[in-house]
Image (cartoon, rainbow, N blue to C red):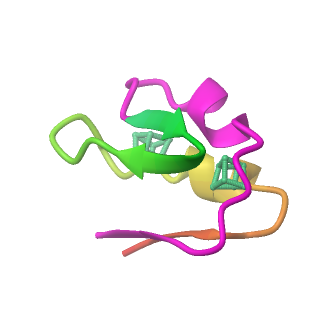
Amino acid sequence: MMEIKDCYGCGGCVAVCPHGALTIDDVVERMDEKCIKCRICEHVCPNGLIKIE
Ligand code: SF4
Ligand code: SF4
């Protein structure tokens, strides 16, 4: 499960996801079927807004 709180839409996580599992339209949304839980996006978010469980 992925939780994104208070995303301000910088797009950083979308750019680094190696599986194209993130899309952005004001805020980020995840496509569950593509996510492999590599956690790269979690580390990239400048404010630690992404939590992968
Ligand atoms: S955990 Fe990895 S695969 Fe899943 S959305 Fe984040 S960067 Fe993409
Ligand atoms: S890196 Fe963080 S703030 Fe930027 S788009 Fe992704 S979740 Fe939102």
Q: How many marks?
A: 0
Left or right: 46 in relation to 36: right
Residue 9 lies, in percent from the top left, at 70, 47
Q: Residue 14: x percent and y percent?
A: 58, 33
Does the rendering let one see residue 29? yes
Which residue sits at x=58%, y=75%?
5
Residue 38 in sight here: no
Q: Is residue 10 left or right of residue 24?
A: right
Q: Along the horizontal axis of the image, is 1 left or right of 50?
A: left
Q: Name the residue at 45% across, 33% down.
A: 23
Tell me if residue 12 is in the magenta stretch: yes
- Quadrant including the N terminus: bottom left
Please identify the quarter of the rendering in which residue 19 is found.
top left
Residue 28 vs 53, above or below: the answer is above
46 up-or-down from 36: above or below: below
Residue span colored magenta = 1-21
Q: Residue at x 36, y 52 (%)?
A: 37
Residue 49: x and y in percent read 66, 70
Residue 27 lies in the magenta-colored region: no
In x, y percent, where is residue 44? Answer: 74, 49
